[in-house]
């Protein structure tokens, strides 16, 4: 990594953002441009993986820790149900190449996608 990601800079206090939760290896913030009533980002503290495919191959326990925190946040900030999105690659909308999960929740049922 040539320069710190926006999320690393938030974790370091260089860019203001409220850290709403953290575990040993993972932290969560509110997305600055929310796409749902609850829109949080769950992010590993270390920027070792660019996307979820690399993360799953390299450290599945860290991926599980992210999903556990997403589940706790959905229970705390909404009714417990949530959508978990990992944009993977620029053509899928990924703009920050420090792996992160979008946790979307709160009133999504009406426009719910099918299986
Ligand atoms: P992605 O497009 O999947 O890489 O997601 C990056 C997300 O980071 C976007 O949803 C942005 O709105 C969000 N984001 C970028 N800068 C900040 C910031 N300073 N604080 C909170 N969220 C941010």
Image (cartoon, grey):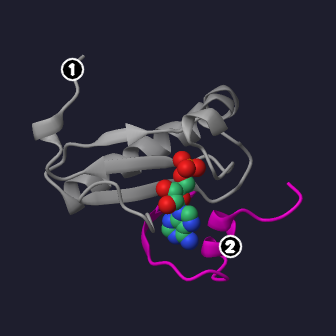
Task: Give the residue at the far right of this rendering.
Answer: 2
First of labels 1, 2 by sequence position: 2
Between 30 and 42, the one nearer to me in the picture: 30
Q: Nearer the viewer, mark 1 or mark 2?
A: 1
Q: Which residue is mark 1?
A: 114
Q: Position of residue 84 (x, y in %)?
A: 38, 40
Q: Which residue is mark 2?
A: 9
Point 18% across, 48% down: residue: 80
Q: Quadrant of the C terminus?
A: top left
Q: Secondary structure at mark 2?
A: helix
Q: Which residues are magenta?
A: 1-30
Q: Position of residue 2 (x, y in %)?
A: 89, 59
- Indicate whether 17 appears above or below 26: below
Task: Give the residue at the far left of this rendering.
Answer: 110
Q: Position of residue 56 (x, y in %)?
A: 61, 29
Number of residue marks = 2
């Amino acid at each position: 990594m040539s320069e710190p990601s926006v999320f690393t800079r938030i974790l370091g206090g260089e860019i203001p953002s409220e850290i709403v939760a953290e575990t040993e290896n993972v932290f969560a913030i509110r997305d600055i441009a929310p796409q749902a009533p609850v829109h949080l980002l769950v992010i590993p503290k270390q920027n070792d993986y660019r996307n979820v495919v690399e993360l799953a191959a390299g450290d599945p326990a860290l991926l599980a820790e992210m999903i556990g925190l997403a589940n706790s946040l959905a229970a705390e900030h909404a009714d417990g149900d949530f959508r978990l999105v990992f944009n993977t690659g620029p053509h899928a909308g990924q703009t920050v190449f420090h792996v992160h999960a979008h946790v979307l929740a709160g009133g999504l049922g009406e426009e719910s996608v099918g299986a």
